[in-house]
Amino acid sequence: MYHKKSAFAARPRRGYRQFYRRAAVHAARFRIERSSGDSVVRILVSGELDLENAPRFRREWQFDCDNDVEVVLVDLSGVQFIDSSGLHALIAAHRHLGDRLSIIASAPCAHLIDLTGLRRILPIIEG
């Protein structure tokens, strides 16, 4: 017996297309720029530091753990949104880099850091 396929089975569902389109736009909004001097590395982060982008941010500062860098300055002044994954990446950076880490926080980042009580732990520079 021959079963005719539905006309809808051949087309992908709309939800998937919209999801991938949103993911591509979201990834385009996140940017990391790195500049280094003699003993200072500046990591400029802009966009959204969330579950999707936190691993990329971790790779940037983990590179500095192995090098002889005196100061790692993480500039979050361009970050509009941060979630718990982003906060966890900042805490992990502080654990590994210790006193070598300094963070410049944007208003949304500073607000979340204050809400969670991490200001007393993380080396925040008002920016």
Image (cartoon, rainbow, N blue to C red):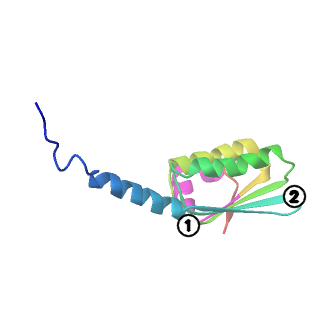
On-image quarter of the N terminus = top left
Q: Residue at x 63, y 52 (%)?
A: 57
Q: Residue at x 66, y 69 (%)?
A: 127
Q: Residue at x 50, y 52 (%)?
A: 83
Name the residue furthest left: 1
**Disc 1 packing (10 Å; few <14; some 14–19; many ≥20):** some
Query: Which segment is the magenta one?
Result: 103-120
Residue that label 2 marks: 39
Whether residue 117 can be seen here: no
- Amino acid type of the residue that numbered disc 1 sits on in the rendered structure: Ala
Classify residue 35 as left or right of residue 47.
right
Task: Check the image and report above or below for 122 versus 80.
Answer: above
Task: Check the image and report above or below for 35 versus 69.
Answer: below
Of circles 2 and 1, the one toward us is 2
**Mark identifier at residue 7:** none
Secondary structure type for disc 2:
loop
Instruction: Residue 3: give x, y in percent of width and height.
Output: 13, 36
Name the residue furthest top: 1
Residue that label 1 marks: 107
Task: Check the image and report above or below for 67 versus 110.
Answer: above
Front residue of 110 and 65 = 65
Whether residue 122 can be seen here: yes
Classify residue 83 as left or right of residue 67.
left
Dot 2 or dot 1: first in sequence order is 2
Instruction: Residue 116: give x, y in percent of width and height.
Output: 53, 50
Front residue of 48 and 111 = 48
Secondary structure type for disc 1:
helix
Classify residue 84 as left or right of residue 67.
left
* Quadrant housing residue 66: top right
* Quadrant housing residue 37: bottom right
